[in-house]
Amino acid sequence: MKAPDRLVGILGGMGPAATAEFYSKLIRRTPVTRDQDHLRVAIWADPTVPDRVGAVLGGTNDAYPAMLEGAQRLRDLGATVAVMPCHTAHFFLPALAKDSGLRFLDMVGETVAELERRPGAAGSVGLLGTRATLASGLYQNRLREERFDVVVPEETTQWQVDLAIRKVKEGNQEDAGRHLDKAVHAMARTDASLIVLACTELPLAARHLTPEGSTDLLDPTDLLADAVIRECGGTPPVTGQQKAS
Amino acid sequence: MKAPDRLVGILGGMGPAATAEFYSKLIRRTPVTRDQDHLRVAIWADPTVPDRVGAVLGGTNDAYPAMLEGAQRLRDLGATVAVMPCHTAHFFLPALAKDSGLRFLDMVGETVAELERRPGAAGSVGLLGTRATLASGLYQNRLREERFDVVVPEETTQWQVDLAIRKVKEGNQEDAGRHLDKAVHAMARTDASLIVLACTELPLAARHLTPEGSTDLLDPTDLLADAVIRECGGTPPVTGQQKAS
């Protein structure tokens, strides 16, 4: 593709492994035959941003100034569009877009739109994410507006999700996969016909799922990467669905 | 580790997949237990920089202005140290450091230093890289100063290296691995007791090597990541050597 006048800003570091994985994914999904066909990208990855889960659950603004500083840096670099590959931080997305003047693509909006496009998508949607993402209703409110039923994990399943996320942040993706596996199996016993990996650490854990599972997984970072490619005039390869099987 | 006052600048995009892999590697090798222990990183990835191989082989300056612009952006963001995960582009490193005023860590210097540290390192060193990296003498001059013998590929082996690099840039790492495999096997029949993967696309191809090889591979991007971690006050985990076996 050809978009030398575009600059994609990635507001990252929350966490770093998820940022690197998103950047890799954007590269893999961009249709190219040589380096020069790829998109120009600027990444601001500040992992010292205070804990986002604590900020959302505690109703504090502790994490916001550092996030806004990152958005302003990307704007000043000339980013024509920006993304933030962290679901929990999407709680702050409207304020970030307003305060920085940067155009952000919305990972939650892309995911809801993808679910609406799917044939027979009226079933229940399972959500796996941080306690902050779930408690804030970030996904549930928009999914319910579109008449989807939403299934969130029971407490013991949420423990497994918490551990999967923590293990990715510690650099241990295999252990993360074992915890996510337990969560996916528990969700498969609910009404959910599809599970949204609503935390950007979870796709890294999902590489290590056991082959027994048969639940459809939807990875919003695939959809966000594809939205970036479309925004820059390209055609992404396929939809983002994958089978946990 | 704790280095909230440091900012690592990565001058990337040459190529993008190698940049993403370097960033992932830096994250994997940084000793942490949580997001906030990771290094602050800014990446400027402009894949539209004109062909570096052509510029070095043709003796032109075509690629330089865009590279310098990237270095200046990283400097203006406040980078306290910078790296450029592309060997061919290291031809321009002294000029970039001088013209931007940015402190760059030198991947070639790190590699030569690692070879000197190794016990019994007096054997021949095999070099796999772009034709520009080899033609410029970037590695050979410094290795010969340290009394290493250097083995470069024969023409038919270089074709395989060229193809391995091109396939990574096209997003086809498995095919890249097949070509690199042929090159590694050819080098194993020379005097080289160790092979330096002197192109940042090659470690991505090396993931797909067949298990038969028994030649030691040295990945300079491991050493560069470790140099960044040391520069920021941390202790990297291990040396960068891996077995192609």
Image (spheres, coloured by chain):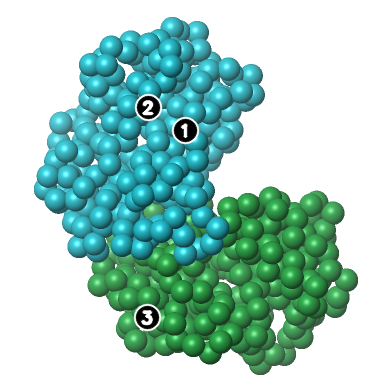
Chain colours: A green, B cyan
Toward the bottom, the furthest residue is A145
Q: Quick check: B71 left or right of A138?
A: left
* Residue B79 in the image, given as x and y percentages of width and height: 26, 57
Residue B240 is marked as 1
Return the disc, 2 or 1, that comes first in the chain's sequence.
2
- Asked if badge 2 and badge 1 are on a common chain, one would say yes
> Which residue is denoted by mark 2 in the rendering?
B114
Q: Quick check: B192 left or right of B65?
A: right
In percent of the image, x 40 and y 76: which residue is there?
A67
Asked if the residue at tag 1 contacts the one at tag 2, i.e. Cβ–Cβ closer than 8 Å, the answer is: yes
* Residue B42 in the image, given as x and y percentages of width and height: 34, 59
Q: Amino acid at mark 1?
A: Gly
- Asked if badge 2 and badge 3 are on a common chain, one would say no
Relative to residue B139, is residue B105 depicted above or below?
below
Chain for numbered disc 1: B
* Residue B43 in the image, given as x and y percentages of width and height: 34, 57
Q: Amino acid at mark 3?
A: Pro
- Asked if badge 3 and badge 1 are on a common chain, one would say no
> Which residue is denoted by mark 3 in the rendering?
A65
